[in-house]
Image (tube, grey):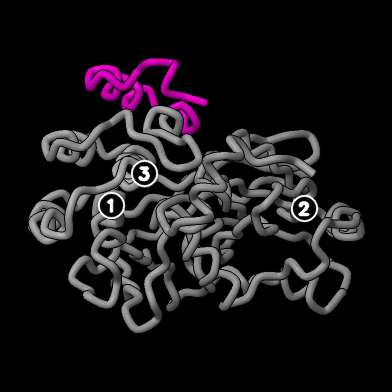
Amino acid sequence: MIKAKPAAAFKAFALTPLLISAVWCLPKAHAAEAQPANTTPTAVALPAVGSCTKVAFNSVSSLKWPLPLYLCHYSAAEFNTLKAQPALDKSWLPNKQSYQGLACNVLDSRLPSIALAHGQHWYRQFANNSEATSAVVQLTELISPYFGCELQLTDTGFTDPCVSARWDKLGRLLAPVSDLPNQSLRQFPFRLDNGKVVLGEADAKLSWQLHDFEPNLQDVTVPLLDRIGKGLFWGKVNEVAALWPQLSAQGELTQSEQARLFIMAVSKQQAAAVRFLVAQGLNPQARTEFGDTALSVAKMIESEAMLQLLSELGANSDSQEQ
């Protein structure tokens, strides 16, 4: 079993709804609806049978794009051979519910393909345990379903450089991550059109839509500190500033609470949010009860920008880490 790193950070995040393995998922009543599709369909050449190529999908709806994808064209024999190989999780097949669950646990709204991909032909072959009789096209998102790191290609499939999870060529998990749920890779929707692969369309009338999971900071059913943290995570500094007097009226924040707010801002590399917290008198060197700091998270996500910013703020001492 492969251990997620750093373990202390994950314990803190699992205990509080403040990051990574428990990224806030909006209640169903407040879940953001799909935005109207306003992307121009991207068509790429279908690679020859037995070959794969990297492609990218762009959306004018989000600055986070392009989304890296891996397009493969398997012969029936190759696909059936891959399909027959055992996977870690026998119940890995995605559906609308599992895709929605994935969407609740990712760091970027660009990541989830939601439910459109689940109906692809090769998924049905798995579900029906039927062998392919012709070539199979597969379009895999090269973004980890764990913490959003870009996947690396290997001879046997894919690997996540951040948590060392591994998947086979069909996106089935081979190496689990301790204390985190098993996750298969997401498959992006497409359709075939005269030797071209149209990215982001399940058919000519059903286009992929960017889903937005930004929180509603005015939802009073959510504790104020949680809303503040969510706002920092998503860079909603102006909205956070408007709520801050309410938070101040509740009394002084503990060191652990201060650390968690900094961690939320740093984890999404929100420089303005980090500077806002410092301007409110919060301590960028604060620790959670597990010893995690903004600096330790910046190092974990390998963010040079955050490391430099924290250095400017005096939070760059190695003594701040356990």
Task: Say whether residue 270 is magenta.
Answer: no
Give how far apart the Cα atoms at labels 3 and 1 are.
20 Å
Give how far apart the Cα atoms at labels 2 and 1 are.
39 Å
Mark 1, residue position: 234
Give how far apart the Cα atoms at labels 2 and 3 are.
51 Å
Crowd band around label 1 with a 10 angstrom C-alpha radius: few (<14), some (14–19), many (20+):
some
Q: Is residue 209 above or below residue 243?
A: below
- Horizontally, residue 133 falls left or right of residue 199, namely right
Of residues 224 and 96, the one nearer the viewer is 224
Using the image, tell me which numbered label, if any, was put on residue 256: 3
Of residues 86 and 241, the one nearer the viewer is 241
Q: Residue 117 sits in which quadrant? A: bottom right
Mark 2, residue position: 74
Of residues 118 and 25, the one nearer the viewer is 25
Q: Residue at x 57, y 77 (%)?
A: 97
The residue segment tinted magenta is 299-322
Crowd band around label 2 with a 10 angstrom C-alpha radius: few (<14), some (14–19), many (20+):
many
- Horizontally, residue 207 falls left or right of residue 311, namely right
Q: Residue at x 61, y 39 (%)?
A: 7
Q: Is residue 249 above or below residue 70?
A: below
Front disc: 2 or 3? 3
Instruction: Please identify the quadrant where the N terminus is shown.
Output: top right
- Residue type at tag 1: Trp
Q: Is residue 134 above or below residue 148?
A: below
Q: Earlier in the sequence, mark 2 or mark 1?
A: 2
Tell me where residue 108 appears, x and y as whole percent: 40, 52
At numbered mark 2, what does the secondary structure look like: helix, strand or loop? strand
Q: Earlier in the sequence, mark 3 or mark 1?
A: 1
- Residue type at tag 2: Tyr
